[in-house]
Amino acid sequence: MKYIEEFRSRELASGIARAIAQEADPARTYNFMEFCGGHTHAIFRYGVQDLMPSNVHFVHGPGCPVCILPIRRLDDAIELAERHGAILCSYADMMRVPGSGRRSLLRARADGADVRMVYSTLDALEIARANPDREVVFLAIGFETTTPPTAMAIETARTEGLTNFSVFVNHVLTPAAIRHILDAPEIDPEQAVRLDGFLGPSHVSSVIGSRPYEFLARTYGKPVVIAGFEPLDVMQSTLMLIRQVNEGRVDVENEYSRVVTREGNVKAQALVDRLFEVRDDFEWRGLGSVPASAIRLRDEYAAFDAERRFALTPKQSREAKSCECPAILRGVKKPADCKLFGNGCTPENPVGSCMVSSEGACAAYWTYRRAETLAEIARRKQAA
Amino acid sequence: MCLAIPVRIVSLDPGQMATVEIEGIRKQVSVALIDDPQPGDYILLHVGYALHKLSEEEALRTLDMMAEAGLIAEELAGEEGVA
């Protein structure tokens, strides 16, 4: 068992595809949101959509941490490196995301700021140890998957007495965002997306478990199937969702049981709880302000909180004009609805975050559906 | 961002670290976030940290469930006389 090849078997895939084709009721449509950018990527990379009947649709959710970080927070990170002279450590995904005036961390580095790309918080700690006379800030982004590694780094810094290390915390919470999406139709009926169920996140769930999704079934009457990231996982989970819908069941099921349990990783959860508390609200790109959807360091850890350690200046950060990332992140628009797709916005020279991250919807369409999407845009232009 | 890969623990090292093997390449990662890591265990590796152990028993069960979906589909197709 290697846990990868087995879940990419062509033979099993065609069996599941046949089952889906038979069990999907042609008299109705199925709209399932895959919250996670990792699922969006798997759906495109392995052509999962092409194996679905035409009435089974995937609605791409906002589960791409790079995409949902508001521009102001990115501008703040650039300020930490430029004005406050810190060594700013960032995961690779963030480096090319354009901030205000299309300035990215990479651009700031070219202009002389000390921005370093790291693979792990372990590397950021190493940089702090090697540069005791410099401030070292880790730009922490990501959902519940990525939070425990941040927490571990802060705990290690505290134990070692690394006083030059701090973290700019932008960690966000998945269940709060899903709740917000489901509440959105009431806020704005124009933007309502009818969702028949959710493919639950793979690795977020390895940490938080399946229990935090139970409110979705209970309160919102939406089926959830926690799905692995391999193509067969996505297909099997879709079949499980179709069965729930057909049978009128509303349950939280777990297809990714080789990793996810109901309780999750209790040790990691305890560590995160010790260091962090929930913010009253947090700005998400595309979703706006979402209550109780992000975390920050507790007062006992204030010394490691870059937001409290440095006086960040207030700024008027702006979204790029015409960029449809916000609507795409809510699932109400597709990349073909954006005027900039391939027309000024490409992965090499991105305008919006959805084109930068490999988990972003625009990047997925660009990599795997470019010709079709550009043809669709051209057709609409002609019709207009 | 949330991408994580299954890797095998080769040996346990001091400081809650472990050496893992990824397609023939060895790398040191942190096992501080999981309980009772053991050489031979498969773990889910994310940004340098083991997040969870993988269960072989559950993996096999899932593969069985997938194979079963195909078999049921075949039977149904047979009943309906659809080739």
Image: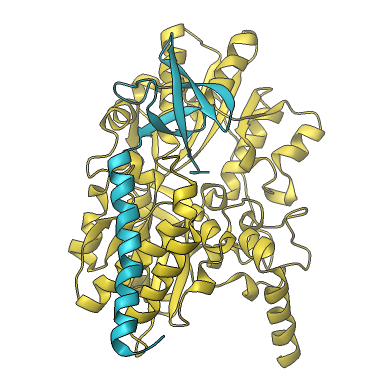
Chain colours: A yellow, B cyan
Q: Residue A84 versus residue A262: which sits nearer the camera?
A: A262
Q: Residue A119 versus residue B80: which sits nearer the camera?
A: B80
Left or right: residue A177 compared with residue A42: left
Residue A258 figure quarter? top left
Q: Residue at x 81, y 34 (%)?
A: A110
Q: Pinpoint residue A22: horizontal percent, then vertical percent.
A: 35, 81
Relative to A4, say whether A371 is above or below. Answer: below
Residue A85 figure quarter? top right
Query: Could one spot residue A282 in this view of the protein?
Result: yes
Left or right: residue A78 compared with residue A4: right
Q: Residue at x 59, y 59 (%)?
A: A45
Q: Pinpoint residue B9: horizontal percent, then vertical percent.
A: 44, 24
Residue B8 figure quarter? top left
Q: Residue at x 36, y 34 (%)?
A: B52
Q: Pinpoint residue A326: horizontal percent, then vertical percent.
A: 55, 63
Q: Residue A311 versus residue A229: which sits nearer the camera?
A: A229
Left or right: residue A299 compared with residue A114: left
Relative to B14, say whether B49 is above or below. Answer: below
Q: Residue at x 73, y 79 (%)?
A: A375
Q: Give the position of the N terminus of chain A as an image quadrant.
A: top left
Query: Could one spot residue A179 in this view of the protein?
Result: no
Left or right: residue A90 compared with residue B80: right
Relative to A84, say whether B3 is above or below. Answer: below
Q: Give the position of the C terminus of chain A as an image quadrant.
A: bottom right
Q: Pinpoint residue A40: horizontal percent, then vertical percent.
A: 51, 60
